[in-house]
């Protein structure tokens, strides 16, 4: 099991936790929490693969992703009071997760032979659409439309990856640069409550 | 026309009626009611087939399903006061419908060569996602997230079917057992207002 | 570049503008407005192609559609006060757009070998589902369910196109008739505040 695969499973595990916790202020039962955790974890990658026609979807071709999600949900249910107190830690994991999944999504799209413009959008979709679908199902305004810089950080990182890739930068250093950039933008924006201007 | 096919058409007919009625307390016009009936009837199976890459979707490969939906919508419009008074009957048909479509979805997924873990999820999706999409479009909290045991009954029945199938139980008796189980769980939960615990 | 292709790009450009403007009364930032413009422009055709299994999706096979969207978004951002005052003009462009995309969607579905019943639904989906997805993501009641005649005008035009096509009417005159009919129904319904009856 190589490092990238291990990281993908770990990222899926944490996405499931953050998805299940997203509904804790509501009357959803355990099943509802598990369902939103599941959707959050598989939604973005599934939508990307459906749009690209890249079958089978990741979690259908490899059920270990389902087990990673299941482990995340069980962890949430069993250690709920503990996990709920770790929100700050989870925010960090979520930030690491979207940065990592963005660039993985870009690379997968390029590897399938699609254009870089498409890869940038699919990278962002991979990272954020799971949360968007979750928020839509639970009648929340998706995080994408709230003030914080979120999807725009992913899109920026995706574009930077593609530009550096175009100019021949090696993969490892490019991964490091673009993933770090997404994390940095997100952390700075949250820390200093930065937001993009609105259409007045 | 074999029995299973006849049951699928009948199930689609009733799903369209229950979908169209779901909006009756709102200002939706006839077209809106017809649209939600359509989405309710085809949504779950379509999402399952799109996720699995199983083309063509059922109602696209066989337009008789469209005619079953159309018949359900016309029935709703023409006999509206009568149909609306039959809510209890419709609840029974909805319960029969989700039980039946769950197991059909499980069997289709297995027949396409996918793993049982995937089949369990796709069985549940077949049954409930039409209603989830309908509720999302009409800004309702999906039934999935309300207190009643609904999707969890389907998932339970799907898992039981898969376990019995694994241990070699014959198809007919397995269908009978797992479909009855879903119906039983649902009826008992509604009758005694049972619900799963929530994340406190 | 033939006329139809040019019209498709222009229609995509205007759909992106109307989608971006749809959120102007809210706190969405520029990125959120751009995202909704993007979804509005590609949503209907993408959903049609995913349902039909017609890969690659239009904007993925031909990135000029992405550039048409990008141009629409930039136009909205740079000339915002001007564009916002042109709502009446945009209503006209939206009406032209849905009429045109409906019939294109019908023709594409027929060309792929699907049945006319499916083509009618896919024509309507092409035109209206981008807006429906946008409204759903932003927690609005989709325009489809509001009182105005909107999707029903598209469906009517699609059916008329199919009937005339069945009876051997030439393509050019059929396009003219069915597109004009959609526009006419929509304009008359808005002008005289007509609406379909509701389920009482």
Image (cartoon, coloured by chain):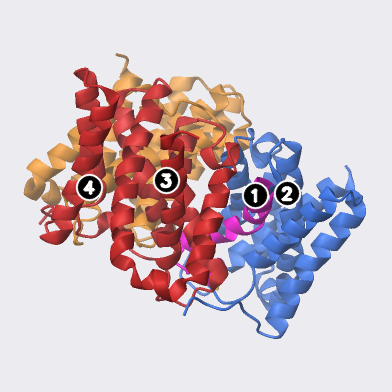
Chain colours: A orange, B red, C blue
Is the Cβ of the residue at disc 1 closer than 8 Å to that at disc 4? no
Indicate the quadrant where residue C114 lies. Answer: top right
Q: CA distance from mark 3 to mark 4?
A: 18 Å
Q: Which mark is residue B44?
A: 3
Nearer the observer: mark 1 or 4; the answer is 4
- Residues in magenta, as a range: C117-145
Which circle's residue, 3 or 4, is located before the other in the chain?
A: 3
Q: CA distance from mark 1 to mark 4?
A: 35 Å
**Marks 3,2: beta carbons within 8 A:** no
User: Secondary structure beneath disc 2?
Assistant: helix
SS for callout 1: helix
Q: Which mark is residue C106?
A: 2
Other-residue count near label 1 (Cα within 10 Å), few / some / many at <14 / 14–19 / ≥20: many
Q: Chain of mark 4?
A: B
Pointer 2 local density, CA inside 10 Å: few below 14, some 14–19, many at least 20: many
As drawn, the label of residue B183 is: 4
Asked if both marks, 3 and 4, belong to the same chain, the answer given is: yes
Q: Are marks 2 and 1 in contact (CB under 8 Å)?
A: yes
Check the image and report above or below for C143 versus B62.
below
CB under 8 Å between discs 4 and 2: no
State yes or no: residue C146 in magenta.
Answer: no
Q: Are marks 4 and 2 on the same chain?
A: no
Circle 1 marks a residue in which chain?
C
The image quadrant that residue C65 belongs to is top right
User: Does mark 1 fall on the same chain as mark 2?
Assistant: yes
Q: Do the residues at pointers 1 and 4 share their chain?
A: no
Q: Which mark is residue C122?
A: 1
Between the residue at mark 3 and the residue at mark 2, the CA separation in whole angstroms equals 24 Å
């Amino acid at each position: 099991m190589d490092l990238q695969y291990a990281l993908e499973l770990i990222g899926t595990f944490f996405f499931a936790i953050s998805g299940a916790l997203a509904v804790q202020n509501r009357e959803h039962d355990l099943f509802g929490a598990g369902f939103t955790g599941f959707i959050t974890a598989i939604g973005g990658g599934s939508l990307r693969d459906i749009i690209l026609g890249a079958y089978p979807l990741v979690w259908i071709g490899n059920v270990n992703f389902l087990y990673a999600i299941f482990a995340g949900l069980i962890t949430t249910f069993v250690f709920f009071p503990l996990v709920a107190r770790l929100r700050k830690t989870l925010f960090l994991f979520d930030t690491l997760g979207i940065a990592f999944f963005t660039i993985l999504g870009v690379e997968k799209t390029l590897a399938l032979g699609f254009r870089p413009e498409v890869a940038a959008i699919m990278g962002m979709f991979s990272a954020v659409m799971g949360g968007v679908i979750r928020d839509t199902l639970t009648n929340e305004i998706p995080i994408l439309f709230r003030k914080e810089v979120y999807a725009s950080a992913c899109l920026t990182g995706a574009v930077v990856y593609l530009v550096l890739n175009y100019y021949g930068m090696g993969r490892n250093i490019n991964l490091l640069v673009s993933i770090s950039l997404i994390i940095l933008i997100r952390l700075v924006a949250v820390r200093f409550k930065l937001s993009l201007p609105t259409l007045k």
